[in-house]
Image (cartoon, grey):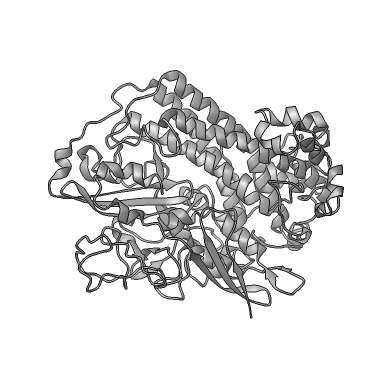
Amino acid sequence: MAKQVLDPVTRIEGHLRLETETTANVVTKADCKCEMYRGYENILVGHSPVDAVQITQRI
Amino acid sequence: MAVENAVMPECANHEPPNTITRLMRNIIMGSEFVMSHITHFYHLAALSYVQGPNMAPWTPYFDNSYYVGPLLRPQGTGSPASGAAASSNAVYAAIMSVAGGPANYLRDLPATAKQNVLYANGVGSAYTGLDGIWDNVVLDYVTALKYRRDAAAASARLGGRTPQIQNGCLVGGCASKPATAVIAEAQSLISGCATFIEEHQIPLTHVVSWLYGPYGGAATGGVAEPAIREYDNDGNPGHGYGSSEGSGLTGPGAQRVLAWGAFDTDDNGGDGANRLLPRGCYEWDGGTSTGCMDPVSSGNLVEDKLVEYITNSNYEDATGVANNWNGMPQDPYQTFDDGLHPFDGYTNPVEDAGYSWSKSPRIMDGTTAKACQVGPLARMAVKGEIDPGTQDYESYQIGATKAFAGTLHPYLGPIVTESTNLNLLVDIYGSPLGGFKCGFSTMDRHRARAYEALLIANAIDGWCDDLIAETGDSYTPWYNDVMSTGTKTGYGAHEAPRGALAHFVTIKGGKIASYQCVVPTTWNVNPKAPDDTMPGPIESAVMGITLSGQTSTGNIVPVEALRVVQGFDPCIACTVH
């Protein structure tokens, strides 16, 4: 078994880490790890509902 | 739209506030789809399949062995990494001839990129030669920049600006309907994009599919398999051939598709059935020859069947916690063990609680939680444009039939030359558009994305006509006092370019008390849940593929895994929101 790490996965949006395990070059296990946190849902709490459409567009 | 659904009686059944708003939102969002799909393919994904010139923005690139055959590498130059040899290439020379050198190439390139720069340097004459594909792709990289800008401009014509639209997405509708001339401008811009997609992007996705996925296979008289066999199906729907359907047959998720639907075609609202891209959740068992897909679940998908898990996510449940992360009262105290509907869900970040900051949304099929892939391929499957397990792309053909008329498309000449198999050409680009088995592979995603972009671009043309002809109010009044009393809940379930998007809001006393988003890539990239035998669609898609390359030290370079991930067009920033 061999392990590979693709970090960061490039030419996508955001920060993704992909960990794979292979046996004879065939992937037998894969973990997708999103490596960032933003917190928009919590930012929105307490705001006026009419703000939501502008705030969530920044997601 | 979630807020509209919560507070505007007119939108209680998910109707748009008025006809103008429906059309405005369709055009604005549709333009966004067109922009996104062109960008993803040409400026993000294609570079993993095409080795560009030895210069920015095409460097660095993979070693030659990762590109199938010579067709998608600079021709006649050997390894472009050898430096000097690349300068003998026509495209390279053309780029270098731009005043000021390559740094000015992209910045100063006028809209008529090909004519001004590359045709003038003799590249055009090489279209029917073996250099055709590579030249075209490199030219298209630049040309596509213009069309992605045009699509964004069309969106801004109506929305006031883009991204972060101002007009068209107010609670209650639009501030105004744009002047006819402005709408016509947007219409014209998108029309140009449609032509580009039809004449360039779709053929190129076919070429890449053919080169990177075995066509037909030896058993059916097709050409020999390329050295790197991946990303497409080989005519055997049950064959785990390095596509997402492989592991998906025994694992969860990859062969299930979900779309909330988008682009209302009337003002009636409802459950999404009236949309250009309809709502649905289907699975394909992979073992039938009929190619039919079955609904995953009955009932209201959004309201009753959607749950999010945090099994392997960096969040914690709220058992015994009186207040959530914001200090807002937590009601009720629920655990995430069984998954929560977004109306009941919350977001309490805890580092290292799992292995990802993505939650794991699932559709409940009875008591079984099922992962579903979302995106253009899912939408085309739900719409019935593709039929998994068959080789019939006929219904996948959008717009006029493109019968083979004896004139080779620039992309296709080299393939014919190379394969000496004219039937192949007809299969690929004649009528019907056969040759590619519809499935759930990486190449299917690229093709579906291009087809969808054309479908939407064509639809925008009609919406612009409708909007120009439409009279009436663009804004339906609503009132703060409606919102400020009591508790109100609402949701909007639509599509973003990358897939199904739903927002859920609870309003108490005029303020947002809870807001949960379940965004496209969260569906695709999520970690295993509700247990470790249930991977998310991208994890499932990567499992089973063969990684072909090795470095001199023997470590595997997972280029194929990169391509599979890119095929989903993931956005991690959206995912974690």
Q: Please say if A25 is above or below B151.
A: below
Q: Is residue B21 left or right of residue B488?
A: right
Q: Nearer the viewer, residue B376 or B328?
A: B328
- Looking at the image, can residue B401 be seen? no
Q: At 43% from the left edge and 19% from the top edge, which residue is drawn?
A: B180
Residue B412: x percent and y percent?
75, 42
- Looking at the image, can residue B537 be seen? yes
Q: At 50% from the left edge and 57% from the top edge, which residue is drawn?
A: B292
The tally of labels here is: 0
Q: Is residue B307 left or right of residue B514?
A: right
Q: Nearer the viewer, residue B294 or B543?
A: B543
Residue A14: x percent and y percent?
51, 55
Quarter-wise, where is residue A57 in the image? top left
Q: Please say if B209 is above or below B262.
A: below
Quarter-wise, where is residue B547 in the image? bottom right
Q: Is residue B48 left or right of residue B489?
A: right
Which image quarter holds the N terminus of chain A? Answer: bottom right
Residue A17: x percent and y percent?
54, 65
Q: Residue furthest front?
A: B100
Residue B18: x percent and y percent?
29, 31
Q: Nearer the viewer, residue B393 or B25?
A: B25
Quarter-wise, where is residue B563 in the image? bottom right
